[in-house]
Amino acid sequence: MSAAVDTPATGEFGNEIAVGLLDWQQISDDLDGQGYAMIPGLLSAIQCRSIAALYADDAPFRSRVVMERHGFGRGEYKYFNYPLPDLVAGMREALYAPLSSIANRWNKAMGMDVQYPAKHAGFLQRCHAAGQTRPTPLLLQYGAGDYNCLHQDLYGEHVFPLQVAILLSEPGADFDGGEFVMTEQRPRMQSRPAVVPLRQGDAVVFAVHHRPVQGTRGTYRVNLRHGVSVLRRGQRHTLGIIFHDAQ
């Protein structure tokens, strides 16, 4: 699978991110094989710290969610408002393009008729026409004792089946614990867990809801959920890039 784009995501937070230069064949293979793929060093330490620092300012955000109030876990997050920060908007657009081809292949394998436009603007038009107009990229903040329950980020009729999380803090220096975890529920089998070993600036691309798996009797769907284990010490920030907008 060749790189689908060579457009860099740029912004006020520093260096360009040449999304098209990533190893998209490996990313595609990892997503097919395990439902997630790591992208080491997608953001620099300076970019990570700059984005994490936005959390203290309410101006870039449309809402704040305290997880414990809703039974989601402990910790909190804020949804960005439009216009998104340049770097966040650039990554959302640039990452969508190669991921859309994977998403289309997955839907075809699972017998689903939905196909996604090649450009993110086209997909957002589809979301907005259905009343899904609120931006979903978010910034999460965890302190000692916080965690995120296993969940799926489904916000309306139109759901893009892949999303990206970028760790903005450094394990061992800024915090301990707080691992990104996933579970995969296979038919007639117990759930399979995975712990993704992220460092500062690393991203993980993962299935939002389900993915196709080739079995002896054809292709079937497996259901996935993701969350964060208990933070033992410090503070952890994560940037979440969700490609569909919310109702």
Image (tube, rainbow, N blue to C red):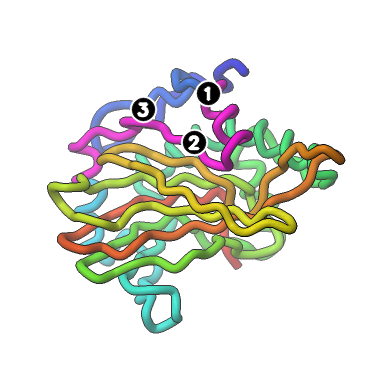
User: Is 220 located above or below residue 59 in the figure?
Assistant: above
Which residue corresponds to the image point at 67% horizontal and 45% vertical from the top-left?
211
Q: Does the magenta run of residues contain 183?
A: no
Q: Give the range drawn in magenta.
A: 25-49
Q: Are marks 3 and 1 in contact (CB under 8 Å)?
A: no
Q: Which of marks 3 and 1 is nearer the N terminus?
A: 3
Amino acid type shown at disc 3: Ile
Amino acid type shown at disc 2: Ala
Question: Mark 2, residues whose alpha carbon is within 10 Å: few (<14), some, or many (≥20)?
Answer: many
Q: Residue 75, position in %: x, y?
A: 31, 70
Q: Mark 1 points at which residue?
A: 26
Q: Name the residue under label 2.
A: 37
Q: Mark 3 points at which residue?
A: 17
Q: Earlier in the sequence, mark 2 or mark 1?
A: 1
Marks 3, 1: nearer the viewer: 1
Q: Are marks 2 and 1 in contact (CB under 8 Å)?
A: yes
Instruction: Return the residue found at the far left.
Output: 173
Q: Residue 15, position in %: x, y?
A: 26, 27
Q: Distance between the residues labelled 3 and 1?
A: 18 Å
Q: Is residue 141 toward the left or the right of residue 222 in the image?
A: left
Labelled disc at residue 36? none
